Image (cartoon, rainbow, N blue to C red):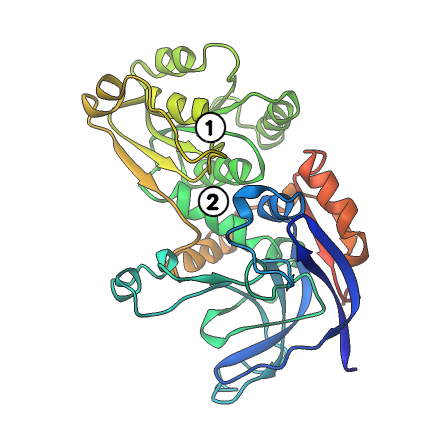
């Protein structure tokens, strides 16, 4: 076997399935993995639609895909086979860091100033094989289902966001109930938040939230709020002053302001959502932010590798996000998967580049 199939971005907004891509060879300190499953991310949707916000990040031609799991296939020179024996079931952190910038020297590798990302500006995992740095590989429990292992990247984002500050016994607002918002809700409920407020403006997202509440038996601990109808007043009145922690996932300027306004004095606002524009206006900044003494947190990716350890511990203890994978397809149906995920018809789509074992 000398060639493989994979989804290649050829230009902004243009991609194709190729069957003649060279199988990548791992260099010194690298590992090749045979991809078992890969998840479609919202970033992939933006890239494939030609979103201008992604133009400065992508580096076509490049193989897409940064959410995945697989098995160690080949070790590059200098990689210890005792640590990563061939066949090891694994995922990987896809941010390739410099190790030298101030953030890296401080141990904040996830915020590396010059990080490159596999699947965006380095070849990624929508292919039969992918190469990553050996230090980025994370061995997985053998009983973790591949469809869950394929979405550890966004689950890690949700873990990082939800656990940025302690939420056990706290009131928490989740602003935006897309896939990561749904994960944040699961995590907050699992670790013991006293009450959750889940907010969205889309009917389908609100219905999914209500279905989750009913399925998990959480009616006494979760309130679903239609954010088109006085969301700040609803949350502030219900909590007699505001939530302890707001998790802002939507990235919409209205959602960002709502999160700030519905958080109690001396509370925390954790921001993961990315606005489409370059600027966001904070309404009544002095009153809503400064005079309330809020703490604002910015979340990017997963802490390397604290978040991975937290995430795997939560999964071992029973955290269940398998229901969020609502479609599974062969890699050849990538275009359909992107369309269905991008339209909101699916919560998470998982692709299989190789035959399932």
Q: In the displayed structure, would residue 2 be above or below residue 278?
A: below
- 296 shown above or below 351: above
206 left or right of 22 in image: left
Picture quarter containing residue 200? top right
Circle 2 crowding by C-alpha within 10 Å: few under 14, some 14–19, many from 20: many
Residue 151: percent from left, percent from top: 59, 52
Quarter of the view holding residue 70: bottom right
Q: Which mark is residue 175?
A: 1
Q: Is residue 46 visible?
A: yes
Q: From what the image shows, is residue 300 above or below residue 79?
A: above
Query: Mark 2 or mark 1: which comes first in sequence?
Result: 2
What x and y, as percent, mark residue 37? 68, 60
Taking depth in this image into account, of 53 and 326 the one nearest to the observer is 53
Image check: 46 left or right of 269? right
Q: Could you tell me how far apart the alpha carbons at marks 2 and 1 are, in whole angstroms?
A: 13 Å
Residue, far bottom: 77
């Amino acid at each position: 076997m000398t060639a493989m199939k994979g989804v290649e971005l050829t230009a902004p907004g243009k991609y194709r399935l190729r069957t003649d891509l060279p199988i990548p060879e791992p260099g010194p300190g690298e590992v090749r993995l045979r991809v078992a499953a890969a998840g479609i991310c919202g970033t992939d949707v933006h890239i494939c639609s030609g979103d201008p916000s992604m133009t400065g990040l992508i580096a076509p031609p490049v193989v897409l895909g940064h959410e995945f799991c697989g098995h160690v296939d080949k070790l590059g020179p200098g990689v210890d086979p005792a640590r990563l024996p061939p066949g090891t079931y694994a995922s990987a952190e896809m941010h390739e860091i410099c190790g030298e910038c101030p953030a890296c020297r401080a141990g904040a590798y996830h915020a590396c100033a010059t990080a490159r990302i596999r699947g965006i500006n380095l070849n990624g995992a929508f292919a039969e094989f992918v190469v990553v740095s050996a230090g980025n590989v994370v061995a997985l429990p053998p009983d973790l289902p591949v469809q869950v292992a394929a979405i550890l990247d966004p689950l890690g984002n949700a873990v990082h966001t939800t656990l940025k500050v302690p939420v056990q016994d706290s009131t928490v607002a989740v602003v935006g109930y897309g896939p990561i918002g749904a994960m944040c809700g699961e995590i907050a409920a699992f670790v013991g938040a006293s009450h959750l407020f889940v907010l969205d403006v889309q009917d389908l997202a609100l219905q999914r939230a209500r279905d989750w509440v009913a399925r998990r038996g959480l009616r006494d601990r979760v309130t679903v709020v239609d954010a088109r109808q006085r969301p700040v007043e609803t949350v502030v009145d219900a909590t007699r002053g505001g939530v302890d922690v707001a998790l802002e996932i939507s990235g919409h300027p209205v959602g960002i302001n709502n999160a700030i306004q519905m958080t109690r004095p001396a509370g925390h606002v954790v921001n993961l959502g990315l606005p489409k524009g370059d600027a966001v206006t904070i309404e009544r900044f002095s009153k809503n932010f400064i005079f309330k003494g809020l703490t604002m947190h910015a979340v990017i990716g997963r802490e390397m590798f604290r978040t991975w350890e937290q995430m795997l511990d939560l999964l071992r203890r029973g955290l269940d996000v398998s229901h969020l994978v609502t479609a599974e397809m062969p890699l050849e149906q990538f275009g359909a998967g992107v369309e269905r995920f991008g339209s909101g018809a699916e919560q998470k789509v998982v692709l299989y580049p190789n035959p399932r074992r």
